[in-house]
Amino acid sequence: LTHGYSGADVTNLAREASMGPLREVLRGAGGGGGKASKVLRPINRQDFEVALKSVKASVSNMDLAMYIKWNEEFGTQQY
């Protein structure tokens, strides 16, 4: 699901998923009867699935190939 995601992409994905519970409360779907709840529900898999629709990988297959080639030539660690 996250092939090609950089560390920053995964951070953005987690940040976006963490906003799911807050957005529900702000939309009034948090069960607070229109009042903001002091306790947010935990982040769940659905939050990540929704976040995956908006947070895309910033590293292309071509970029990955370039980094692998560079590592083979100049890197100090074999994978």
Image (tube, rainbow, N blue to C red):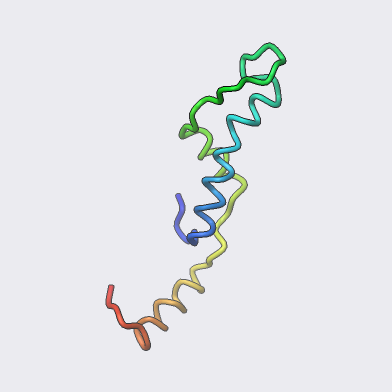
User: Relative to residue 70, is residue 76 drawn left or right?
Assistant: left
Q: Residue at x 40, y 82 (%)?
A: 69
Q: Position of residue 50 (x, y in %)?
A: 57, 38
* 3 in relation to 79, above or below: above
Q: Quadrant of residue 26?
A: top right
User: Relative to residue 27, is residue 69 drawn left or right?
Assistant: left
Pick out the residue farthest to the front. Answer: 38
Q: Residue at x 29, y 78 (%)?
A: 77
Q: How many marks?
A: 0
Q: Quadrant of residue 30?
A: top right
Q: Quadrant of residue 28?
A: top right
Q: Residue at x 31, y 82 (%)?
A: 76
Q: Position of residue 2 (x, y in %)?
A: 46, 53
Q: Quadrant of the C terminus?
A: bottom left
- Between 1 and 15, the residue placed more toward the observer is 15
* 42 in relation to 5, above or below: above
Q: Position of residue 9 (x, y in %)?
A: 54, 56
- Between 39 and 57, the residue placed more toward the observer is 39
Pick out the residue farthest to the left. Answer: 78
